[in-house]
Amino acid sequence: MNVIRFADLVAQGQARGKRVFIRADLNVPQDKDGRITEDTRIRASVPAIRLALEGGAAVMVTSHLGRPTEGQFRPEDSLEPVAERLAELLGQSVRLVADWVDGVRVEPGEVVLLENCRLNKGEKKNDPVLAKKMAALCDIFVHDAFGTAHRAEGTTYGIAEYAPIASAGPLLAAEIDAISKALANPKRPLVAIVAGSKVSTKLTILQSLASKVDGLIVGGGIANTFMLAAGLPIGKSLAEPALLDEAKAVMAAMQARGAAVPIPEDVVCAKAFAADAPATVKAAADVAADDLILDIGPKTAAKLAEQLKAAGTIVWNGPVGVFEFDAFAGGTETLARAIAASSAFSIAGGGDTLAAIAKYGIEGDVGYISTGGGAFLEVLEGKTLPAFEILTRRAAG
């Protein structure tokens, strides 16, 4: 994917004395008093800002926060806590600017944070009048918010259309490189783990990957639907019987290519969905009518772990069991540790996946951890993200 990289512009001296507008993802969780409870996204935005400062630019940064109503400011929608945390991380003052669309005063070496961009009328619908006004504020636009790359909004798409130069920041560029490495030019075999409660929410992903991957591991409620499609009993487990034909079609598509969707041989069951429910390992064929399947069994996990250790590329989206309950975390932990031990290039994304990575402390052993939930899923679906499309088009002139 050919895009203009902001790092290259800085290296060429093109940012010196210029006005740089960075679209970051600073949408962080806060408590009821407005205090930031987790600042990963703010810390992830710092490299692009530092790059702009080191390049001699006058720096403007904006982001959305929460779900404000356009044109209606409420104190809880303000980026003020973010400005304070950003100032601490950068070691310099960060001025918060409201009502910034018609003009911003900023000097080289200075960083200003432009108030919540979703307060601007026309942001969500990508109003071209708003986009042109924002583009006029800068010499260089930098998209560094992968979490918003699947949305064609004013600050994620429109400004990139009209800014003199539109580029990818270091965070977005890293996502592009990881996605290209995993899906466009993967080292084989390419194995994907797709797990979640419902096939319906991941059906297009499963269909897309079925034409690309050498192994497709399914987990969670999705695996239950595939077990049902394979003629196995699932008791009272979560599943979608209406989608059996779709599950069978995915299995057939894989089989036609000499690939497979491994169906669990054993599972971990309980009579109730609870952390303290007694867990029982059973052969997949022996699931009782009143059983809930809450994890893959140890024999299945061990076989899948061997497959992952032999992979060239691994794409991971979703834990394979109810890993929040220790009795039903064995499958997810086994696969997580297999990914960590594999020499394959691995890319992982999705909130629950990131929580599992953190739980087992394998952050340093995963090739790339994606920062965007919805955007990551749309890439797996085979969609071209709006941000990638416009940046590629602008790079082509």
Image (cartoon, rainbow, N blue to C red):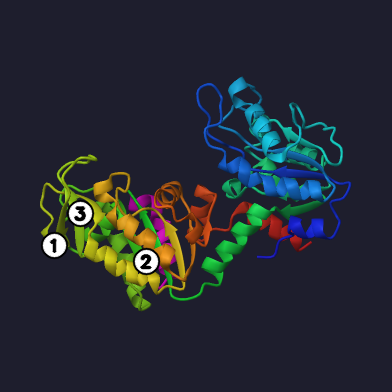
Secondary structure of residue under mark 1: helix
Q: Residue at x 64, y 22 (%)?
A: 73
Q: Is residue 247 above or below residue 255?
A: above
- Main secondary structure found in the magenta portion: helix
Dot 1 or dot 2: first in sequence order is: 2
State the count of labels.
3
Q: Amino acid at mark 2?
A: Leu
Q: Residue at x 32, y 44 (%)?
A: 324
For label 1, the residue is 285
Q: The residue tagged with tag 2: helix, strand or loop?
A: strand
Q: Nearer the viewer, residue 220 or 253?
A: 220
Foreground mark, 1 or 3, reads 3
Query: Cβ–Cβ below 8 Å for labels 3 and 2?
Result: no
Q: Which residues are magenta?
A: 198-216
Residue at mark 3: 268
Query: Alpha carbon of mark 3 to alpha carbon of mark 2: how far?
Result: 20 Å
Residue type indicated by callout 3: Val
302 relative to 287, above or below: below
Q: CA distance from mark 1 to mark 3?
A: 12 Å
